[in-house]
C-alpha cells in the first residue's frame, strides 16, 4: 500500500512566478496564468500514474495545460503531465501525471474563439475542396489536347499541367486529412497523440508537396527564361519533378518524425498539427515553405527583368508565348498567395489576437478558390 501526503495551497499562485520551460534547457516568462490551486503530493513509494481534478478559478481563461513545478529550472513544466478532460460547463479540469511533486494548471488570458475559426475553416475548406475537384475535372478534359501533339512547346505545356494537377491533388488530399483530423478530435478533450500522429504526418507531407510542386513551377519558369537553348528530355524532367515534388517532402516529414523522438513531441497538445511549444517540429514545415516562397519571388524578379530588358517571348510562336505567360501568371499568383497565408500562420504562433487567427483562417480556407478562379486552363 502506498501512503501519500497531499497539501493544497489556494494562494500560492500569488507567490510562484509564471515562468515556463520553453525548451529542454531554458525557461522564459509566460503570458499564461496559474488558474487553480497548487497541489503538493509526496508519496512513500514511486507513483507512475496519478490524476487530479482542478477547479478553474477564472472562467474567462482558456487553453489549459497541466504542469508541475520544476525545481531545477524554477519554472512550470508540462513533461509527464497531460490534460485528460476539460469540463467547460462544470468548470473543472482533469490532469494526469506520471510522477509526484507540486502541480497546478496554467491557462491563457486570451482565449481564441475556436468555434468562430472552426466555422470559417469548415466552410472555406469545403468550398476549396469543391474548387479542387472542379480543377481536376477540367484538367482531365483538357489533358488529351495537352498530350495529343509533340514538340518543345507541348513539352512545356505538358509540364505546366503536370505541376498544376499535382498542386491541386496534394492540396485536396491535405484537406481530406484535415476533415479526418476534425472527425477524431474533440474540442472538449486534448489531442490524442497516437491517433493524430498518422494524420499529422500525411498533412505535413502533402502540404510540403504543394509547396515543392510550386517550386517546380518556378524552376520551369526559370528554365524557360534563362536556359532557352538547353533543352532536356521530358523523361529526365519528369524524373526530377517527381523526385523533388514528392521525394523531398517525404524525406523532411520522415526526419521530423524521427527527430522528435515520440508522439508527445511530434503532435501539438492543442490541435492535430505539428508541435511548436516543446519540439519546434512546426519549423519542419514553415522553413521549407517560406524558403520556396522566397526562391520563387527571386525567380519572378529575374523573369520580369528578362522580359523588360530583352522582351522574352517576342520572337516565339503564339502558342509557346501563351504557355510562357500562363506559367508566369501561375507562379506570380501562387507565390504571394501562399506566402502571405503562411506569413500570417507564423503570426498565430506568437500572437493570440483573434484578428490574426481569423485572417489566417480565411486565407488558408479560400486561397484555393481564388487560385482556381484566376487560373485559366
Image (tube, rainbow, N blue to C red):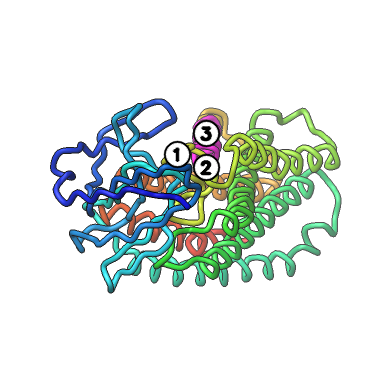
Please report the bounds of the magenta region as a residue range: 282-304
Query: Quick one: SS at disc 1?
Result: loop
Where residue 212 sits, quadrant-wise, is top right
Residue 262 spot, x, y in % from top left: 59, 42
Task: Work out whether mark 2 precedes mark 3 in sequence or the reverse, and give the earlier one.
Answer: 2
Q: How far apart are marks 2 and 3 (CA)?
A: 24 Å
Query: Quick one: SS at disc 2?
Result: helix
Q: Nearer the viewer, residue 275 or 209?
A: 275
Q: Does the magenta stretch include residue 214?
A: no
Residue 75 spot, x, y in % from top left: 30, 34
The residue pinned by badge 1 equals 278
Residue at 86% across / 41% down in the picture? 235
The residue pinned by badge 3 equals 291
Callouts 3 and 1 close, C-beta under 8 Å: no
Binning the other alpha carbons within 10 Å of mark 2 as few (below 14), some (14 to 19) or many (20 upward) gives many
Q: Looking at the figure, which quarter contains the C terminus? A: bottom right
Left or right of 232, for residue 228 = left
Q: Main secondary structure of the magenta part?
A: helix
Callouts 2 and 1 close, C-beta under 8 Å: yes
Residue at 57% across / 72% down in the picture? 130
The residue pinned by badge 2 equals 265
Residue 228 spot, x, y in % from top left: 71, 31
Q: How far apart are marks 3 and 1 (CA)?
A: 23 Å
Callouts 2 and 3 close, C-beta under 8 Å: no
Amino acid at each position: 500500500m502506498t501512503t501519500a501526503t497531499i497539501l493544497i495551497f489556494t494562494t500560492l499562485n500569488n507567490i510562484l512566478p509564471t515562468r515556463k520551460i520553453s525548451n529542454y534547457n531554458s525557461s522564459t516568462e509566460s503570458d499564461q496564468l496559474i488558474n487553480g490551486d497548487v497541489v503538493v503530493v509526496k508519496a512513500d513509494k514511486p507513483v507512475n500514474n496519478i490524476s487530479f481534478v482542478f477547479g478553474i478559478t477564472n472562467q474567462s481563461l482558456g487553453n489549459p495545460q497541466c504542469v508541475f513545478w520544476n525545481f531545477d529550472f524554477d519554472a512550470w513544466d508540462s513533461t509527464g503531465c497531460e490534460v485528460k478532460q476539460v469540463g467547460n460547463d462544470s468548470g473543472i479540469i482533469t490532469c494526469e501525471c506520471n510522477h509526484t511533486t507540486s502541480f497546478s494548471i496554467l491557462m491563457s488570458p486570451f482565449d481564441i474563439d475556436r468555434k468562430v475559426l472552426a466555422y470559417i475553416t469548415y466552410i472555406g475548406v469545403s468550398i476549396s475542396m469543391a474548387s479542387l475537384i472542379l480543377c481536376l475535372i477540367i484538367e482531365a478534359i483538357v489533358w488529351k489536347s495537352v498530350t495529343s501533339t509533340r514538340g518543345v512547346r507541348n513539352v512545356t505545356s505538358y509540364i505546366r499541367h503536370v505541376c498544376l494537377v499535382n498542386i491541386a491533388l496534394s492540396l485536396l488530399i491535405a484537406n481530406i486529412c484535415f476533415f479526418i483530423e476534425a472527425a477524431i478530435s474533440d474540442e472538449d478533450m486534448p489531442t490524442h497523440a497516437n491517433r493524430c500522429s498518422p494524420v499529422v504526418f500525411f498533412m505535413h507531407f502533402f502540404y510540403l508537396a504543394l509547396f515543392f510542386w510550386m517550386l517546380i513551377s518556378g524552376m520551369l519558369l526559370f528554365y524557360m527564361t534563362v536556359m532557352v537553348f538547353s533543352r532536356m528530355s521530358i523523361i529526365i524532367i519528369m524524373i526530377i519533378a517527381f523526385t523533388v515534388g514528392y521525394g523531398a517532402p517525404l524525406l523532411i516529414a520522415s526526419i521530423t518524425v524521427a527527430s522528435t523522438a515520440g508522439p508527445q513531441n511530434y503532435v501539438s497538445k492543442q490541435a492535430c498539427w505539428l508541435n511548436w511549444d516543446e519540439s519546434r517540429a512546426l519549423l519542419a514545415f514553415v522553413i521549407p515553405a517560406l524558403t520556396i516562397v522566397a526562391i520563387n519571388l527571386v525567380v519572378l524578379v529575374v523573369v520580369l527583368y528578362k522580359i523588360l530588358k530583352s522582351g522574352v517571348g517576342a520572337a516565339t510562336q503564339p502558342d509557346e508565348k501563351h504557355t510562357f505567360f500562363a506559367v508566369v501568371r501561375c507562379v506570380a499568383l501562387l507565390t504571394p498567395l501562399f506566402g502571405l497565408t503562411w506569413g500570417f500562420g507564423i503570426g498565430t504562433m506568437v500572437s493570440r489576437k483573434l484578428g490574426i487567427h481569423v485572417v489566417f483562417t480565411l486565407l488558408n480556407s479560400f486561397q484555393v478558390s481564388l487560385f482556381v478562379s484566376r487560373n485559366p486552363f
